[in-house]
Amino acid sequence: MAARTAEEILAQYTPQMSAERWSQIGPFVRSVISEAYPAPERAKVSGNRIGVVAGLVSWALDQGLPLDVEQIFAPATVNRYAVTVPGFAETSRSSRRTLLTTVSRRVTRRAPWEPRRDPLDSRSTPFPYTDAQARWLVECVDMQRTSLRYRGLGTAVVLGLGAGLRTAEMVGVLGTDVTVRNPHLLVTVTGEQRPRTVPVADRYGPLLAELARNAKSEPLFRAPPIPRIEFVPNLLHRCEIPEPLRPVTVARMRATWAVALLTTVPMPTFLRLAGYNDIDQIRGLLPYIPAAGPQLSRDELDHITQAVLP
């Protein structure tokens, strides 16, 4: 049997979705592929590439977007799909976003694609929130339509932005793990790998105190049992969050907390509070740390000239 041409592959391709959905989006997907890969490049098109594009389009339709290339293949939409849709390994997310970015640049005319996007992989560091965005995210807690989302987003915010905890550490935090050292709150991280006590940034104190008071001896996230790790990203994905703040991930909150501390506390203190074993683990955060000014302040000068070995 002769090998199928690229045009035949495109015309005959059927993705893993209902026939009704494919009949709804199939013509649009084929037109996008044809636009992204002109005739000389059409031989590069495979069923896998078509499937990735079809997956984005089907998901976008579920989000209420019309079949419009400028909206579906906009940077915010592609990034949100690649980062937040459950069920993909990190390597798969990276390859999907790379492919969709290439397609998007070719088929859009008005979408604000930046000159370059670093590939997302398991070693990449999420871009931190700005201070204004972090404050906005706190305000979003009160926007949630259900008590579960209020409790879940609130817990993620206070433990992520306020204490820099990982997802696996957050899910095990109980209301009784929150203690007071006037006028500050501290959260105790239990477990065998990185047990520690972390002071919580004061701006998140009132919300954390409320959550801990209501949870008592239960997990902060929800009533028992302790949730599985995947509960957290799935819940955050369902929360009412403005598009400029997406994607909302624990890793991004932790990165925001880490950058704030790296500009404030000595390195040994930061490594202990973050649960890091060595300094190499902060390499991805360095581009987000503000550069020092050309002149040393009086306090900086005093610290430097009085430095001694412990």
Image (tube, rainbow, N blue to C red):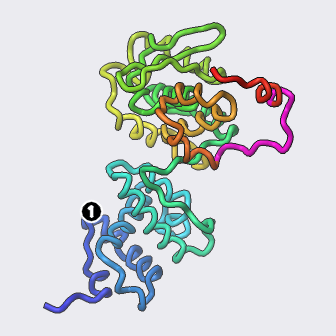
Choose between 4 and 300: the one closer to the eye: 300
Position of 309 with respect to 76 (left or right) is right
Residue 289 is inside the magenta segment? yes
Choose between 21 and 238: the one closer to the eye: 238
Q: Which residue is mark 1?
A: 17
The N terminus - image quarter: bottom left
Q: Main secondary structure of the magenta part?
A: loop
Which x, y percent locates residue 54?
A: 36, 67
At a point 41% along the width and 64% down the height, the residue shown is 57
Which x, y percent locates residue 31?
A: 42, 79
Choose between 118 and 278: the one closer to the eye: 278
Q: Residue furthest left?
A: 1
Q: Quadrant of residue 81?
A: bottom left
Tag 1 secondary structure: loop
Choose between 233 and 179: the one closer to the eye: 179
The magenta segment is 288-300
